[in-house]
Amino acid sequence: MTDPAQPFTHLDAAGRARMVDVTAKEPTVRAATARGEVVCSAEVVELLRSGTVPKGDVLAVARVAGIAAAKRTPELLPLAHTIGVHGAVVDLEVTDTGVRVEATVRTADRTGVEMEALTAVSVAALAVIDMVKGTDRSAHLRDVRLVRKEGGRSGTWVRPGEDPGERA
């Protein structure tokens, strides 16, 4: 819920979009973890488990795509700050219904890495879909969400109902 006493930080007094100025903020250690899922057919799950997807090593490609995406987030989101992504881990796990994706991004900077973690999960999931779409046109991405953030003024936040220690 938005507090009417607090103005939107990405809008100036005239209501125009602006990038928030974080120059005066002190850099702090920050981290964010996001999760999502690719849902696909039982046939694709079997191909993933056996390592026989025609396009190659799906999980390796998706992992690299997610890490690269975390580093390029400001190119995709016009009001995101360019920050030093000092660590990015993308984990993928084949499940009975598809692939679970989890990304944790770390920095020591003036603003958080929530968008970088969400972007990493989204692009890693899209890479999976790109590599299996020839076998399963119905493969889709769902439930991309931030599950944990640490650092900054607001400290640590964990999404209710999520097990922050449970890895993808």
Image: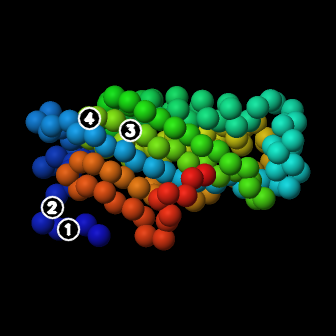
Q: Which residue is mark 1?
A: 3
**Is 121 or 17 nearer to us in this picture?**
121
- Percent of width and height locating residue 78: 36, 36
Q: Residues within 10 Å of mark 3 (few under 14, many from 20)?
A: many
The amino acid type of the residue labelled 2 equals Gln
- Work out whether mark 1 precedes mark 4 in sequence or the reverse, and give the earlier one: 1
- Work out whether mark 2 precedes mark 3 in sequence or the reverse, and give the earlier one: 2
Q: Which residue is mark 4?
A: 109
19 left or right of 97 in image: left
- Percent of width and height locating residue 165: 50, 57
Q: Mark 2 to mark 3: distance in Å?
A: 28 Å
Label 3 SS: strand
Q: Which residue is mark 2?
A: 6
**Is 153 or 4 nearer to us in this picture?**
153
The amino acid type of the residue labelled 1 equals Asp
The amino acid type of the residue labelled 3 equals Arg
